[in-house]
Image (tube, rainbow, N blue to C red):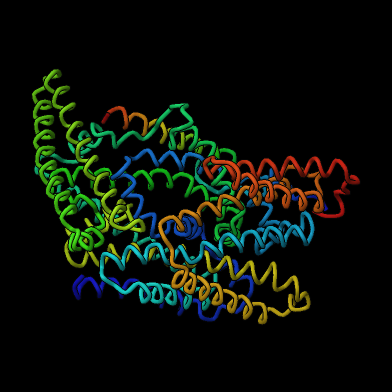
Amino acid sequence: MKLPDSKNPDESPDVPGFRTWRGIYLFVFAGFVVVVVLLTVFSHYYA
Amino acid sequence: MNTLDWIVLLVTMVGIAAYGAWHTRHNDHLETYLKGSKTTRWGTIGVSVMATQASAITFLSIPGQGFESGIGFVQNYFGLPLALIIVCAVFLPIYRKLGVYTAYEFLGQRFDAKTRLLGAGLFLLQRGLAAGVTIYAPAIILSTVLGWRLDLTILGTGFLVIIYTVTGGSEAVSLTQKWQMGIIFGGMITAFAILLARLPEGLGFSGAAHIAGAMGKLEAVDFSLNPDKRYTLWTGLFGGLFLSLSYFGTDQSQVQRYIGGAALREGRLGLMFNALLKIPMQFSILLLGAMLFVFYQFQPAPVFYNRVEWQHYADSPNGAVFRSLAETNAAIQVVKREKIQSWLDARAQGNAAAEAAARAAMLEAQAKAEAVRTEARAALTSADPLAKTKDSDYVFIGFILDQLPHGVIGLLIAVMIAAALGSKAGELNALGTTTTIDLWRHFRPLAAHDEGRNVRAAKRFTALWGVVAIAFALFAGFSENLIEAINIIGSIFYGVVLGIFLVAFFLKRVGGTAVFWAAVSAQVLVFVLFFSLKISYLWYNLIGCAACMGLSLVIQAFMPARNPTQKI
């Protein structure tokens, strides 16, 4: 028996605006980058 | 606390526990008892994952961290969203597809029984040792400031969590955590709003943030490559990724929260919910601490925030030195307040030169205030070498008791206890499940088919771990250093456990015997290095994981080639 294939898109995310899980992961990653940028701007603004 | 506070506290805490126990009292199916309801949606899973991670110490200590050192601690969470994406894409689909109850059951299917027992054993050892601290740490702070008896606080919270966790298992844990997080969010937002309202008139959030920023409390992101700095973007990204991957991917107290649910989609969305919200949530709690710092620039601030302990020494025969330090602190506070007002005036006038001079004077006054606080800690240590000198945990609870109206005080104490119960429930649930599935069923394989017997065993083991945690909290005699020691023990074991799982997922040619001996050798290596080197304990996560993976490849090279069709 082989290790189950984790890359298999076994189900659609069923989230409006997203067709694949990869899209959701990219969205979350982009959200993380935006948060870090906002925190940096916040620090500089109030420094 | 008055009667209204007690009513709010008891109604919320006992009410949620009773609701959880009553609603899930007929849970006698093993699948539901250990994984939760099959209809659980992503919102409940997401909140449950968040509640399991957020202990009472999160809401007591992190505002203190923001108060004392600023909001730079938020960088510790930078690796978390990346780790959760990896858990969603790699770990969770495999756990769901195999239908395992525990993460260590997966190791049994991928490798062999001995590797599964090793993984489960390391988890039980590490989480079992930490179990007492989860109850003890908030109990010691609440009992100190509220004058409650420590043993009754530990027994009360301990038995409350045992009752509903044993009764309803994983479903009761998720259900109660949802309501507890509602109390936590409501209480923290209320406290923040009241804190902003109590700032001097006309200052507002923006003015307060400018003061906090000028005092160095709002440096959220540090790009420095200096290895001596504890919190930087890089330590957060790499160290945080490592710690979070280990915690969310291999620690049963988290795995159990997301492997159930209606479908794979629900677990994934629950984890993505945390990936998006965790950093803003931690930032808000730290910002609350930074705002508390500003608040105490305009209010009489104690020289030492654990006022009960300070008063104990101030009232002793050698109390003159403590009273003198308190007077010096009060005088410096007055001067500092004037300097801050001068800086605010200079800013308002737009006079850059006057602003720079006033800022330097303000920072000088702040340095003097810090020096007096350092003297106060030294005086405590001098009076009693065992005195607790870390007072930042008492800043927020002191504000709650001094500044919030009755009723809201009860709500905020409920926040602390709800957080303690939520994280403790997840922990007990995982300890009971791992003991039942990975140990008890291993040694009694015939019992695996008797569902009722399995549920009864899981209930007994959950209760047993709860009693062990209470006994540990009551009799272990923790000190501040011992609490840190428990965190160090976690780091010593986490790396090797993560290494075993990463071999399982990514090094498919490595078999059970190779990874087992590699893990044992890596654990011995970590112990040897721990006792011979003086490096930050966080590094042992990386060393343990890398050693386990590297040694697995080396040992496997000297063994017959693994037949991938024999095991998963």
Residue at the limit of the structure toward the front, as seen here = B317
Residue B201 or residue B334, whichever sits in front: B334
User: At 75% from the left edge and 48% from the top edge, which residue is drawn?
Assistant: B518
Percent x, y of residue B400: 23, 59
Q: Residue at x 18, y 66 (%)?
A: B406
Q: Looking at this rendering, what residue extends furthest in the top direction?
A: B353
Residue B162 in sight: yes
Residue B133 placement, left or right of B29: left
Quadrant position of the N terminus of chain B in the picture? bottom left
Q: Position of residue B22 (x, y in %)?
A: 45, 80
Name which quarter of the figure residue B451 lies in: bottom right
Query: Splitting the image into 4 quarters, where does residue B99 fall?
Result: bottom right
Position in image of residue B347 (x %, y %)? 13, 26
Q: Quadrant of residue B136?
A: bottom left
> Which residue appears at 28% of the width and 54% of the height?
B380
Name the residue: 39% across, 54% down: B58
In the image, residue B225 above or below residue B530 = above
Would residue B310 appear left or right of B222 to someone viewing this image?
left
Q: Residue furthest right?
A: B560
Q: Nearer the viewer, residue B11 or B356?
A: B356
Asked whether residue B86 appears in the rendered view, the answer is: no
Image location of residue B200, percent across then percent down: 11, 44
On the rendered structure, is B188 left or right of B437? left
B399 or B169, which is in the foreground? B399
Q: In the rendered image of this protein, does residue B32 appear above or below residue B371?
A: below
What is the count of numbered marks?
A: 0
